[in-house]
């Protein structure tokens, strides 16, 4: 292993600019003549817009324009779309309601845009926005997904009766029912997967500029996938032809899914920039992020697990209501279906699974992918059921898991997925050793002497990453292919630029991708640049989400590097007057087999461009190759997380005292970066389990709408983590990578709740398990115990 | 618009600003020092932390006009141009204390102030408690805590930090 090759904990290339304040985030970009946009937003969850009076606002100092939904419609700017078609079990297509970038006629959630003010400064725009008079007729609203389908619930969109977007199912209902009928034991749980706000620390922003001379629009925005943004804004919104729109996603300060989607604000900035003839910038304030960034999770589920007399799982049955909010966000339909139902087999051999999902509209912010996206919800269902079943039957939770683990591969689950590689026993065993489970009993007794209740919780999770084979997702309703592109440009001096369709917003691609190139070409790490995030520079690509950039994005680079090596060997053969088949390439040097002839990488690169040693008829000059990589399967990262908590018996306050994570991500390129991804994922999962919740009141007001009342995990809420790895390589891509970005967020919530319920002796602990919630569970457990005595 | 003069990163600066202009706006929009970030509107996240007269403050909580004559140090001023990094900056890089980089300037400025107040031998509990005012969504804090402990030690070993005058 070289110091900068695959497997080395190389320090990150991107860090220098970030630690010196030289990063370039969207809000840092300033264009000449730039104006600022501030949106007027609905204070009502649902209302009819009777009229908008902007006359006073337009007279305010510095105001350039005030624009409304009526003008947007006049200019024929199209609606935002959801790009994944889901069909209901009766065969009918999902019910997608119109989603204009600025509301026209009605508003459907608090924060829905009703007008935009463009002014010289942000302060002036804000002042003028206060003067826009909107006459609303408030209408009844529904925010709770469990109530959205009720007969007396307000009907939000005409296209969706009972606010139902689709009623989807997966699996064999009859066979599952038969398995339940034969079961010796059935474990049942009602689960609420709490609604979360992604809260990347960089708020979303958009800056649009129109060049009338070339009829070219440019958008700088906080995007995880600038090409997809361009495609949707061109082809569906109809803003401009695709080749007349450039999208640049510069440094992006965290995404976690929330910056995948195409949002109203970027559409409005583009439209307004062309309309006013000046650049228009919008930057969200945090309160606005809470009211406009797509939220995550928000499931209400009833789940049942059937087991035989020996603790073997026979079947799983799940019924879920998924809240998609007021409009269908870009990929929202796929999250509670093909990224959820397909993972319900967990790490277990489950003969029959049947899953039903109703997706509903409510008067809340749209819900879409948030770190893990469907897979945390699936893992929570499976891992809670297994844990509770073990306790009910009286088998140790790890033992019940072992009895049901899938042990041979490939394994076809009853819910589409074909698991290709894994060793679930190995990760469980290693995690139990690292967590010193053997001594847990002693630690529990010691804690009890101090009035503390110790609990241990397991989560043996699985996820599907490396999204995804295009044909497969196409057959499931995806509107796009999920391959990735790469271009490798070798310069005449031998330095290399890799242009990738992946996008980094914290993941460190500039480092890991360069490690791959350094390893393959044997050239110094410093001589390699990774270029991403600009549609004018990079060939169409699909972007970064679903832990796909290693498994899919790097595979595309491998393919391009294969082509580069093949071409370079041809050049070297001409240079050394040898047969192409005799050229060997190792550690940055070309040699002729069986001779002492050699050529350095940089000489071959130069010769490829000066083209003095071969004729253009024999070989094209230059050294640049492109590839598109379409994976052959999903990848299946899996592992075991063990959480140990101490609950204060008097207050219900929970402290995480130990965290052990053992993950199988296949090949690891940079262990330092991979560990960092695991840490961050765990923190978000712990946040969901203990702290975070997007709370709507019955009128549809977001009660937890700022960092004052939405509890973000802080340093003192978390322990240091013990992180280990096991490795089975993915057979589905050339590097054997599985992906690491979401594992922590997927594994963690079940581990935390399993630990708390173990500590308090009651399964009735909902997320977030605040001190009050845990204290109430303790009281119930005590009452039950006393009644039994 | 009224005028204000102060010292930022060792240089005398002045400008005419609206009364409501916050220090962070003055830094970002008037001086184009965009290393100081804004992550919230309730003074919770700490992405905007700078040093004023040697102490860490959230620059979203101060009016620029209130800082006449003040000495302000931002992330851009921690290391001399082309000079070595501040030990705390280097510690964040060595310990992978950042991912997306957005909270990082505020984290580093807060970290240096923790060292000023609590010394160079910082235990994990102290660092975690003292970071209450800085939110990171990427790292889970594990490596930030390690970075600050290492940076604090490095600062004691002669990597004399450049500090705004008290």
Image: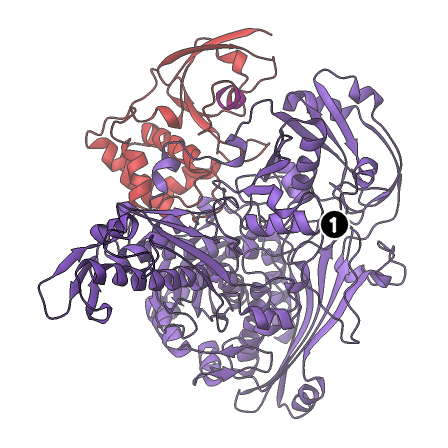
Task: Examine the rendering and report whether any part of residue B44 can be seen.
Answer: no
Foreground residue among A244 and A285: A244
Quadrant of residue A766 in the image? bottom right
> Which colour is chain B painted?
red
Foreground residue among A96 and A449: A96
Residue sitting at the far top = B2
Chain of the residue under label 1:
A
> Which residue in the protein does label 1 denote?
A364
Please, is residue A569 above or below residue A10 in the view?
Answer: below
Please, is residue A658 above or below residue A133 in the view?
Answer: below
A565 on left or right of A538: left
**Is A559 covered by the magenta stretch?**
no
Badge 1: few (under 14), some or many (20 or more) residues near its Cα, within 10 Å? Answer: many
Q: Position of residue B10 (x, y in %)?
A: 35, 15
Q: Position of residue A507 (x, y in %)?
A: 43, 51
For the residue labelled by badge 1, is the local secondary structure a helix, a strand or a loop? loop
Please, is residue A346 above or below residue B97 in the view?
Answer: below
Please, is residue B90 above or below residue A496 in the view?
Answer: above
Image quarter of the N terminus of chain A: bottom left
Q: Residue at x 14, y 69 (%)?
A: A593
Residues in magenta?
B24-29
Task: Examine the rendering and report whether any part of residue B99 can be seen.
Answer: yes
Image quarter of the C terminus of chain A: bottom right
Q: Position of residue B1 (x, y in %)?
A: 60, 7
> Which colour is chain A painted?
purple
Q: Position of residue A452 (x, y in %)?
A: 46, 58
A193 on left or right of A500: right
């Amino acid at each position: 292993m070289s110091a900068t090759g695959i497997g080395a904990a190389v320090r990150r290339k991107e860090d220098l600019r970030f630690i010196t304040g030289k990063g370039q985030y969207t809000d840092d970009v300033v264009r000449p003549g730039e104006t600022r946009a501030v949106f007027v937003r609905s204070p009502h969850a649902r209302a009819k817009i009777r009229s908008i009076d902007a006359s006073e606002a337009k007279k305010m100092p510095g105001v350039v324009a005030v624009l409304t939904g009526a003008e947007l419609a006049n200019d024929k700017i199209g609606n935002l779309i959801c790009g994944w078609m889901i069909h209901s079990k009766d065969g009918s297509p999902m019910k997608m309601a119109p989603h204009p970038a600025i509301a026209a006629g009605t508003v459907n959630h608090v924060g829905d845009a009703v007008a935009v003010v463009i002014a010289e400064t942000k302060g002036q725009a804000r002042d003028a926005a206060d003067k826009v008079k909107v006459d609303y007729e408030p209408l009844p609203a529904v925010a709770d997904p469990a109530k959205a389908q009720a007969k007396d619930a307000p009907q939000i969109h005409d296209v969706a009766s009972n606010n139902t977007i689709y009623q989807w199912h997966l699996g064999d209902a009859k066979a599952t029912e038969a398995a339940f009928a034969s079961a010796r034991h059935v474990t049942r749980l009602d689960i609420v997967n709490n609604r979360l706000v992604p809260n990347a620390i960089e708020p979303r922003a958009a800056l649009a500029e129109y060049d009338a001379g070339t009829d070219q629009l440019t958008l700088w925005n906080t995007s995880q996938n600038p090409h997809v943004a361009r495609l949707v804004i061109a082809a569906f919104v109809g803003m401009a032809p695709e080749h007349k729109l450039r999208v640049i996603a510069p440094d992006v300060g965290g995404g976690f899914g929330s910056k995948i989607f195409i949002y109203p604000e970027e559409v409005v900035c583009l439209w307004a920039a062309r309309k006013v003839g000046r650049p228009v910038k919008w930057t969200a304030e945090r309160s606005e992020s809470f009211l406009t960034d797509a939220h995550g999770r928000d499931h209400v589920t009833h789940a049942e697990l059937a087991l035989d007399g020996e603790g073997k799982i026979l079947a799983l049955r799940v019924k879920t209501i998924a809240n998609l909010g007021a409009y269908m966000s870009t990929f929202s339909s796929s999250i509670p279906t093909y990224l959820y139902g397909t993972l319900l087999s967990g790490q277990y051999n489950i003969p029959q699974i049947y899953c039903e999902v109703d997706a509903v509209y409510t008067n809340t912010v749209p819900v879409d992918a948030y770190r893990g996206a469907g897979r945390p919800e699936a893992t929570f269902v499976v891992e809670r059921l297994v844990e509770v079943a073990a306790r009910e039957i009286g088998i140790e939770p790890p033992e019940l898991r072992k009895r049901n683990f899938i042990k041979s591969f490939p394994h076809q689950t009853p819910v589409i997925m074909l698991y290709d590689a894994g060793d679930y026993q190995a990760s469980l065993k290693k995690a139990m050793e690292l967590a010193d489970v053997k001594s847990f009993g002693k630690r529990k007794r010691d804690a009890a002497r101090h009035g503390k209740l110790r609990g241990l919780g397991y989560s043996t999770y699985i996820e599907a990453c490396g999204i995804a084979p295009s044909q497969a997702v196409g057959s499931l309703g995806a509107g796009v292919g999920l391959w990735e592109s790469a271009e490798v440009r070798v310069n005449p001096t031998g330095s290399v630029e890799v242009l990738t369709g992946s996008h980094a917003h914290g993941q460190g691609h500039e480092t890991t991708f360069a490690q791959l190139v350094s390893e393959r070409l044997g050239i110094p790490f410093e001589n390699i640049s990774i270029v991403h995030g600009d549609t004018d520079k990079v060939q169409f690509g699909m972007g970064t989400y679903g832990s796909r950039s290693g498994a899919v994005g790097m595979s595309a680079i491998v393919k391009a590097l294969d082509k580069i090596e093949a071409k370079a060997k041809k050049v070297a053969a001409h240079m050394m007057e040898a047969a192409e088949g005799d050229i060997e390439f190792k550690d940055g040097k070309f040699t002729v087999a069986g001779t002492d002839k050699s050529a350095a990488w940089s000489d071959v690169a130069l010769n490829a461009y000066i083209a003095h040693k071969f004729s253009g008829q024999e070989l094209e000059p230059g050294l640049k190759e492109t590839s598109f990589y379409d994976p052959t399967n999903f990848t299946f990262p899996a592992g075991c997380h063990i959480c140990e908590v101490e609950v204060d018996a008097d207050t219900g306050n929970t402290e995480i005292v130990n965290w052990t994570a053992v993950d199988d991500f296949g090949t690891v390129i940079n262990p330092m970066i991979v560990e960092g991804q695991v840490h961050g994922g765990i923190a978000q999962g712990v946040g969901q389990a203990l702290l975070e919740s997007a709370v709507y009141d019955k009128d549809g007001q977001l009660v937890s709408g700022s960092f004052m009342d939405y509890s973000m995990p802080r340093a003192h809420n978390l322990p240091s983590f013990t992180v280990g790895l096991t490795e089975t390589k993915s057979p589905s891509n050339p590097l054997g990578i599985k992906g690491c970005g979401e594992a922590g967020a997927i594994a963690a919530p079940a581990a935390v709740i399993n630990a708390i319920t173990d500590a308090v002796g009651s399964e009735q602990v909902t997320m977030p398990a605040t001190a009050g919630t845990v204290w109430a569970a303790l009281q119930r457990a005590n009452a039950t115990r006393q009644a039994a005595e | 618009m009224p005028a204000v003069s102060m010292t930022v990163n060792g240089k005398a600066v002045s400008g005419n600003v609206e009364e409501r202009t916050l220090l962070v706006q003055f830094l970002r929009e008037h001086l184009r020092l965009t290393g100081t970030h804004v992550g919230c509107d309730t003074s919770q996240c700490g992405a905007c932390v700078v040093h004023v007269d040697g102490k860490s403050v959230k620059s979203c909580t101060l009016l620029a006009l209130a800082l006449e004559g003040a000495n302000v140090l931002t992330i851009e001023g921690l290391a001399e141009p082309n000079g070595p990094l501040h030990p705390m900056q280097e510690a964040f890089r060595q310990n992978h204390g950042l991912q997306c980089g957005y909270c990082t300037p505020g984290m580093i400025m807060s970290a240096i102030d923790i060292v000023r107040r609590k010394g160079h031998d910082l235990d994990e509990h102290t660092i975690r408690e003292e970071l209450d005012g800085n939110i990171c969504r990427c790292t889970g804090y594990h490596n930030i805590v390690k970075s600050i402990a290492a940076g604090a030690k490095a600062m004691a070993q002669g990597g004399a930090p450049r500090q705004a005058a008290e």
